[in-house]
Image: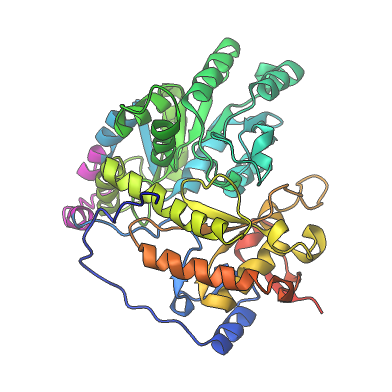
Amino acid sequence: MKNYPAEPFRIKSVEPVSILPREEREKVIQKAGYNTFLIDSKDVYIDLLTDSGTNAMSDRQWAGLMVGDEAYAGSRNFYHLQETVQELFGFKYIVPTHQGRGAENILSRIAIKKGQYVPGNMYFTTTRYHQEANGGIFYDIIRDEAHDATLDVPFKGDIDLNKLENLIKEKGAENIAYVCLAVTVNLAGGQPVSMANMKAVRELTAKHGIKVFYDATRCVENAYFIKEQEAGYQDRSIKSIVHEMFSYADGCTMSGKKDCLTNIGGFLCMNHEDLFMAAKEIVVVFEGMPSYGGLAGRDMEAMAIGLREAMQEEYIEHRIKQVRYLGEKLKEAGVPILEPVGGHAVFLDARRFCPHLKQEEDFPAQALAAAIYVECGVRTMERGIISAGRDVNTGENHHPKLETVRLTIPRRVYTYAHMDLVAEGIIKLFKHKEDIKGLRFVYEPKQLRFFTALFEPKA
């Protein structure tokens, strides 16, 4: 029997929830335009929409809120956050932002010149938006295996060094803004990047004077996979692995709503003073003073405390293995999932779950997410053609090879019993998957359409 550790915390406060009858759930999804983002929280039984900002904070974090210094400038909570990040990540400079996309916006504005390429290990929705909005051209350099949902190989998030080197030769180093390396890779299924790959990327880019910025949102989860699966790291602490990871980067964007275990917040880090000075100018325009960046002092305090808690060995082992538990339950029942199970979510393979639906015509992942809610009151998220959006030049749909539904597990919120209920509902739906109908657009936003688009079932 596999070892799934018990929750390494005591539950002190609870939020009562209840499940609506099926006929009510059918009305809810219709009113929401078959978009799970538009369902009211009160109508959701188990919420696996996202792990962003949905964490349960600890008693120490809640206590930290009470020592919030809400000064407009020079908050002591900013200095606590700065010292914590400098110690754990090793970067010289930090600029707080209201969340991760605030950091993405600033980095894109200060580091990208129009027409430059931004190679990365698979796109992420908001990251690519900011890159393209500032004249950049995203270029996928993830290893090919990451685009195959059925391959169970370690470190599917690694950058393909040949792809990166060929891009440099073809376009010239001066036409590459920076390399964007995500740890872990969300849309590849939460797949990690190996330490060896990070070192190799650093060595290659250093030869050409190209900077490397990490999307560090789930860096602690990535560190656990390195400790578990990469030779030479089994006896290293999570804290030391995280610090080494960042030693191969010039900076990072961070959403505090994930591995800082908070409900709001983020920051941008860098080692170059010129970029830091430019970032401080931009943050004032979009976020606020460089010592608060759109956050209350109490939020920065909670981030500083949460980042340390995320590196506790017992916490991160339970975090990864709770997600793995759900994945194994589904896999054992024959439900097609993206393999191997990643760090923050289980991804259903909508192509194999709904083989009767076509990506371009029927939006299988969107239809599957809506059907899951009706089946068992669980809210999930589409991660396929709808999330991929349209090409900014041609207006045509991007066609990602991965068409998935993400079952995203909030941190320190649910128990294994909740995972059992989720699995049971999805397994039941899989047995009558032919009943799932395709969808078509009723309303399609021009940017980041997956958040607010409206759909209706096809006849």
Please provide the residue range marked out in magenta: 60-80
Q: Residue at x 37, y 31 (%)?
A: 242
Quadrant in which the C terminus appears: bottom right
Nearer to us in this view, 235 or 193: 235
Q: Measured along the vertical axis of the image, is residue 202 above or below residue 336?
A: above
- Residue 306 shown left or right of residue 387 in the figure: left
Q: Residue at x 47, y 75 (%)?
A: 44
Q: Measured along the vertical axis of the image, is residue 368 above or below residue 259?
A: below
- Residue 74 shown left or right of residue 207 in the figure: left
Q: Residue furthest front?
A: 1
Nearer to us in this view, 392 or 201: 201
Q: How is the image coloured?
A: rainbow
How far from the left and from the top, in percent, is residue 151? 64, 41
Q: Measured along the vertical axis of the image, is residue 260 above or below residue 11?
A: above
Q: Is residue 218 magenta?
A: no
Q: Is residue 65 magenta?
A: yes
Task: Count the numbered circles shown.
Answer: 0
Nearer to us in this view, 337 or 30: 337
Q: Residue at x 61, y 33 (%)?
A: 120
Q: Quadrant of residue 426?
A: bottom right
How far from the left and from the top, in percent, is residue 35? 62, 70
Q: Quadrant of residue 79?
A: top left
Residue 260 seen by the camera:
no
Nearer to us in this view, 65 or 109: 65
- Residue 423 shown left or right of residue 348 in the figure: left
How far from the left and from the top, in percent, is residue 225? 44, 36
Residue 363 seen by the camera:
yes
Q: Residue at x 48, y 85 (%)?
A: 20
